[in-house]
Image (cartoon, grey):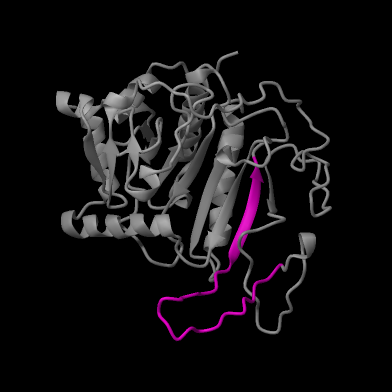
Amino acid sequence: MSEYSARSPHRRYNPLTGEWLLVSPHRATRPWLGAVEKVPQANRPQYDPQCYLCPGNHRASDTVNPPYTGIFVFDNDFPALLPPVRTGQHASKGAGGLPLTSAPPLHASPSPLFRVAPEAGVCRVICFSPRHDLSLAQLPLEQIQAVVDTWIAQCQELGARDDIHYVQLFENRGEMMGASNPHPHGQLWANEHLPTEPAKEQHHQLAYLQEHDVPLLVNYLEAEQHEGERVVLQNDHFVCLVPFWALWPFEVLVLPKVHIRRIVDLNSAQRNGLADVLKRLVTRYDNMFEVPFPYSMGVHQAPYDGEQHEEWQLHLHFYPPLLRSATVRKFMVGYEMLAQPQRDLTAEQAAERLRALSEVRYA
């Protein structure tokens, strides 16, 4: 980066979304008298009798979890999406009397300003381990490989359905990111329609492909590897880097080294390569402030709508909120909500700090 960019306010463009963000590196050392978060609980039991995700325990729906020993997947007891009502089918009830099928009473409005449309889908929970006290960083590599295999199996199953056109895999880690349970788990929400953020990325990836005849993120990774200063770690199949347009303090983008549109397209070696960089990255996160590092992570991939989508490149986003310590986070408020995103720590500074961290988790 130029001296001007490294020290002075400037804007950076995100080609995936078409949005700009403000970078203010001169503010990185300003004093902090705002909210201070609680440090996450350091020691949790291997099994918690009150946890609704531990093996053998009752969930809120009064369903009893099986005594699982590996990955456990179940339909969310309180889903944000409901499966569509089939012809001649009656809506059944689930946890708390919630309907298990959706039949929204939608009424057309004479004004185009009041638009509404039904949305059906599937929401599932994916427990990464029977152990209550572990995180993705602490799982053995073989177990993370099993998580990746489960993601792929779920996408294969749901992506083959006519009523599912997009599968969003994600993990919210830590209370700071809204996780309702510390047990190691992620989720998938499979939609009938393409959600907003993947739709933005699809629009800009398609425009780039039409203009340059090569996928946007394929070109982008080549440029990042040439410059090198934002690359954090890599193996034979994947690269983890702090994107040039990073918004969150230690945001990371995970990209395959070849053109892959969907997670189901990964071969065996690439699946294991993804598991490897995930473990190494989240271990570095934990070592940043020697705490279980909070983040939201998600897989972005091409829709499952029967189209080829050559514009798409599979990628994973990590959005961690911690800014300067285990207890000070980045808040998206004020200017960020009303004008445009803003950050103090540059992407290059964040990448340098992440590169310097050990891949052996702190004791």
Q: Residue furthest top?
A: 363
The residue closer to the viewer here, 260 or 41, is 41
Provide residue 119's location: percent of width, then percent of height: 55, 69
Provide residue 242's location: percent of width, then percent of height: 34, 32
The quarter in which the N terminus is drawn is top left
Q: Which residue does the image show at 65% across and 76% down from the upper left?
A: 85
Q: Is residue 54 magenta?
A: no
User: Would residue 11 be found to the left or right of residue 165 on screen?
Assistant: left
Can residue 246 be seen by looking at this rendering?
no
Q: Which residue does the image show at 76% across and 71% down from the upper left?
A: 92
Q: Is residue 113 magenta?
A: yes
Provide residue 44's location: percent of width, then percent of height: 72, 25
Magenta segment, prevailing SS (helix, strand or loop): loop
Q: What is the quadrant of residue 141 in the picture? A: top right
When the figure is inspected, residue 211 is found, relative to residue 163, above or below; the finding is above
User: Would residue 16 be found to the left or right of residue 108 on screen?
Assistant: left
When the figure is inspected, residue 141 is found, relative to residue 156, above or below; the finding is above
Q: Which residue does the image show at 43% across and 60% down from the upper left?
A: 303
Can residue 317 be seen by looking at this rendering?
yes
Q: What is the quadrant of residue 248 in the picture? A: top left
User: Would residue 157 be found to the left or right of residue 252 on screen?
Assistant: right
The residue closer to the viewer here, 30 or 342, is 30
Provide residue 312's location: percent of width, then percent of height: 34, 54
The residue closer to the viewer here, 48 or 299, is 48
Q: Residue furthest front?
A: 33
Q: What is the quadrant of residue 172 in the picture? A: top right
Q: Which residues are magenta?
A: 100-127
When the figure is inspected, residue 283 is found, relative to residue 306, above or below; the finding is above
Q: How many marks?
A: 0
